[in-house]
Amino acid sequence: MIKVLNTLTNGFPLWVLMATILSLLHPPLFTWFSGRMITWGLGIIMLGMGITLTVENFQRVFKLPRLVGVGVLLQYTVMPFLGWSFGYLFDLPPALAVGLILVACCPGGTASNVISYLAKVDVALSVTMTAVSTILAVVMTPFLTAWLAGSRVAVDAWGLLESTFRVVIVPVVAGILINRYLHKATQKILPAAPLVAVIFITLIVASIVGGRPRGNHLGRPPPDPGGLFPARLRLFVRLCLEFSDDATGNSRPDHFH
């Protein structure tokens, strides 16, 4: 039975892909799972993670603050830079570029905790980084977005902290307490917890994809096939290839006009 559960859990990317395709073809299959149901789904996922943790897990993390510091530093340097870089290289419309940069400047969230959980790595470290990066986001998200996108973005500090506390902290703490005081019962349901997380993540992703706005709202006509490889990206690839040729002494026909 455990082997079957593990096999279904390891099929996580396949289930998400299949559900996403179905949601694009027929949104009502998944859009019913929306609103407060998504919040409850995230809470159940985090509760399932919490029952795998103990107080000792967090004590160990707090003894190594450098790990948290490095993670938060990368969160607010590498990700914002990548968001800006992709917006520039793919020559995105201003609305999409600013949105991409804004998302890249946001703190870690439930998704990173879930992936850590499914990958069976240090969930306590991931949850701690989520809490710390969320607190810093009150300052870092508007500052980085304004710097990289030139747009002032109002951040609802209390709403951000409250949602993180409600969706992440409370369920994780509840899970830890359940694991501590109802340990035998926890061990019986523990094998199914990852699969439950996969089911709810799949529903959430498919629901969001199915509920996306239809049509072109960017004030730009749909791109033709030749526009899928924009000039800036062609230039970037060309420079990389020329650098590689210079380093190896090879010559290459020019295919990037």
Image (cartoon, helix red, strand yellow):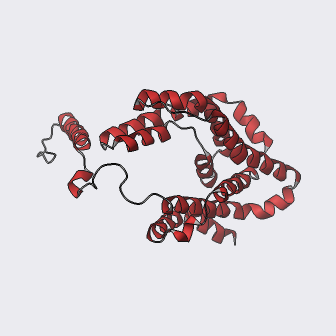
Q: Observer-nearest residue: 62 or 214?
A: 214
Q: What's the residue at 32%, 48% (across, down)?
A: 219
User: Where in the figure is residue 251, as x and y percent of width and height?
Assistant: 12, 41
> Is residue 53 at all visible to an observer of this figure?
no
Q: Observer-nearest residue: 121 or 208?
A: 208
Q: What's the residue at 43%, 26% (across, down)?
A: 147
Where, quadrant-wise, is the N terminus in this rendering? bottom right
Q: Observer-nearest residue: 45 or 144?
A: 144
Q: What's the residue at 48%, 64% (across, down)?
A: 20
On screen, residue 132 above or below 53: above
> Is residue 11 at all visible to an observer of this figure?
yes
On screen, residue 34 above or below 172: below
Query: Number of marks in the image?
Result: 0
Q: Is residue 257 left or right of residue 152?
A: left
User: Where in the figure is residue 79, as x and y percent of width and height?
Assistant: 47, 37
Q: Is residue 120 left or right of residue 104?
A: right
User: Where in the figure is residue 72, as x and y percent of width and height?
Assistant: 57, 32
Q: Is residue 227 left or right of residue 134?
A: left
User: Where in the figure is residue 174, as x and y percent of width and height?
Assistant: 80, 49
Q: Observer-nearest residue: 1 or 116?
A: 116
Q: Is residue 87 left or right of residue 54?
A: left
Where, quadrant-wise, is the C terminus in this rendering? top left
Q: What's the residue at 54%, 38% (across, down)?
A: 106
